[in-house]
Image (cartoon, helix red, strand yellow):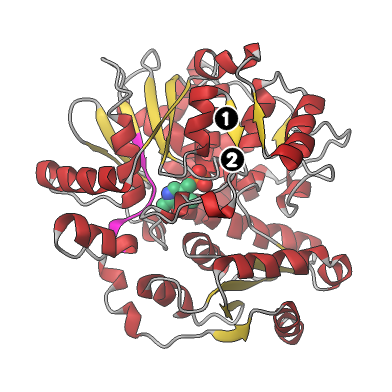
């Protein structure tokens, strides 16, 4: 299996080459040259597999430069009941007729990003050891991504994490999650500024190519193909739990921000998994809903990006969206580059409404979309608690609200549960008048000793910290 860039670069790379890379050299995103096809007999064989074995089967279609026994061992080590809380790893929970929640958020940081990041940690450790190299991951977080990365990389050989976050601005629970880690290879840098300052610092350091090379700086952002392909597995696992045989179809609704999660659903569908609709659910930041309704993709400025109660979906542009548009345009790299590499930069938008390809988003690729607001979230959280006795988080509530607008008789609808309510306690209290349930292992974490260094919002200060701590 070789990988190509969505912007038409001539290079073809193998999995382990792109594993530690970000963007392709032309600024595009990596995709496999073709999607491996899964036939009926294979689906039947996979139906009864435990999650770790299913992960191995899916991944081995995309990874041919890690020996099978090693890859299987990595999958078995990653997807365990001890780490993800249940034997099923991603259990389905039925709501009313044919509607299900698929639990993706029982990993170490209680958000779906653990599903991919835990695998990435083990793949990084494996590949770095094989090459005899080291990697210093530099990131910026306002909560979910940073903690998922830290819990995936803690204690791993060859990897250090330097995670910047805005000083005093994360919730007490999020701060406790990250800052209580005592592993020597994890460095929490609380920057005196806002999230954008952190992101600017990370960009400035990454743009200093000499520094980047000398100190082996890398990232773990959501455009990494390995993260995406790890997410493909739970679409298969959800399908098998909701159906009895392969003639049945299911639909998925996915709370979306950067389009990484639902893009994995698109890949699963392209492989032949019988998916009817892929419903993209957004919050007030409705860049994606607007596209799927109108054909216009219009990135937002920061003044136009709302701070909402489902903050992990507060995006101004969807960084993985280019992958889908590349497929939609018949894998035309020149056209994709014209849209994402040129037009977006100049005008901040492009319009496919008159392009015959746009109608295919719905007809051929199964996409539809919807939007949910703060009031919808509160109502959905309350309704779910009253009728089913379970608490759901704000992002999942966005998904559930939109899913109910896209039901079709006889087709199970699976809503991906992307976080647990404890992470967003203030909104749960607003909706239900009571505190969310807290998993036992997080009892009292706010009182644990904290390991964090406070720095000025200054590129030099962060560089100096890295230099002093990466030997
Ligand atoms: C990251 C995140 C999302 C958005 O996922 P994308 O892959 O960016 O679309 C949704 N919900 C939660 C809880 C998240 O952490």
Residue 388 x, y percent position in the rendering: 13, 42
Residue 256 on the magenta span: no
The residue carrying pointer 2 sits among few (fewer than 14), some (14 to 19) or many (20 or more) residues within 10 Å by Cα, namely many
Res. 66 mark: none
- Residue annotated with mark 2: 229
Quadrant of the drawing holding the C terminus: bottom right
Determine which residue is flagged by label 1.
Answer: 267
Where residue 302 sits, quadrant-wise, is: bottom right
In the depicted structure, whether residue 32 falls above or below residue 158: above
Q: Nearer the viewer, residue 3 or 310?
A: 310
Q: Quadrant of residue 354?
A: top right
Q: Nearer the viewer, residue 39 or 389?
A: 389
Quadrant that contains the N terminus: top right
Residue located at (75% from left, 84% from top):
464
Verify CB contact (< 8 Å) between mark 2 and mark 1.
yes
x then y, percent, for residue 412: 30, 24
Secondary structure found at label 1: helix
What residue range appears in magenta?
A: 415-422
**Pointer 2 or 1: first along the chain:** 2
Asked whether, in this view, residue 289 is left or right of residue 161, the answer is: left
Mark 1 nearby-residue class (10 Å; few <14, some 14–19, many ≥20): many
Q: Is residue 271 above or below residue 65?
A: above
- For image coordinates 45% across by 73% down, the residue present is 169
Q: Is residue 416 magenta?
A: yes
Q: Residue at x 16, y 43 (%)?
A: 383
Q: Point out residue 360 in the picture as x, y percentages from the top left corner.
A: 57, 14
């Amino acid at each position: 299996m070789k990988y190509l860039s969505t912007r038409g670069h001539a290079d073809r790379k193998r999995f382990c080459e792109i594993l530690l890379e970000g963007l392709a050299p032309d600024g595009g995103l990596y995709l496999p040259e073709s999607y491996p096809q899964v036939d009926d007999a294979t689906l039947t064989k996979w139906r009864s597999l435990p999650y770790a074995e299913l992960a191995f089967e899916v991944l081995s279609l995309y990874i041919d430069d890690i020996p099978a026994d090693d890859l299987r061992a990595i999958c078995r080590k990653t997807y365990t009941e001890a780490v993800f809380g249940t034997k099923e790893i991603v259990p389905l929970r039925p709501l009313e007729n044919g509607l299900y929640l698929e639990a993706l958020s029982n990993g170490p940081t209680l958000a779906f990003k653990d599903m991919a990041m835990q695998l990435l940690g083990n793949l990084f450790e494996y590949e770095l050891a094989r090459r005899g190299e080291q990697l210093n991951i530099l990131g910026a977080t306002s909560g979910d991504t940073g903690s998922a990365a830290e819990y995936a990389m803690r204690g791993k050989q060859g990897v250090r994490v330097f995670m910047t976050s805005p000083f005093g601005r994360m919730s007490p629970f999020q701060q406790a999650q990250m800052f209580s880690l005592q592993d020597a290879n994890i460095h929490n840098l609380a920057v005196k500024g806002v999230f954008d300052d952190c992101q600017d610092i990370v960009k400035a350091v990454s743009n200093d190519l000499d520094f980047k090379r000398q100190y082996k700086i890398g990232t773990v952002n959501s455009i990494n193909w390995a993260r995406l392909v790890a997410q493909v597995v739970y679409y298969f696992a959800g399908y098998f739990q909701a159906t009895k045989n392969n003639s049945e179809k299911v639909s998925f609704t996915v709370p979306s921000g950067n389009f990484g999660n639902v893009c994995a659903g698109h890949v699963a569908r392209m492989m032949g998994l019988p998916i009817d609709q892929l419903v993209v659910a957004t919050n007030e930041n409705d860049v994606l809903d607007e596209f799927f309704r109108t054909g216009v993709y219009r990135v937002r400025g920061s003044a136009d990006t709302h701070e909402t109660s489902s903050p992990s979906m507060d995006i101004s542009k969807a960084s993985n969206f280019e992958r889908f548009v590349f497929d939609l345009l018949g894998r035309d790299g020149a056209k994709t580059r014209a849209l994402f590499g040129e037009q977006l930069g100049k005008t901040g938008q492009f319009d496919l409404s008159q392009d015959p390809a746009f109608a295919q988003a719905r007809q051929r690729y199964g996409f539809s979309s919807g939007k949910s607001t703060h009031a919808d979230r509160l109502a959905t959280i309350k309704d779910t608690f009253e009728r089913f006795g379970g608490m759901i988080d704000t992002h999942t509530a966005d998904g559930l609200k939109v899913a109910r607008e896209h039901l079709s008789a006889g087709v199970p609808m699976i809503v991906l549960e992307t976080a647990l309510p404890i992470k967003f306690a203030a909104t749960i209290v607003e909706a239900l008048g009571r505190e969310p349930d807290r998993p036992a292992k997080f009892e009292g974490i706010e009182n644990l000793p904290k390991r964090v260094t406070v720095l000025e919002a200054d590129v030099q200060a962060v560089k100096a910290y890295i230099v002093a701590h990466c030997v």
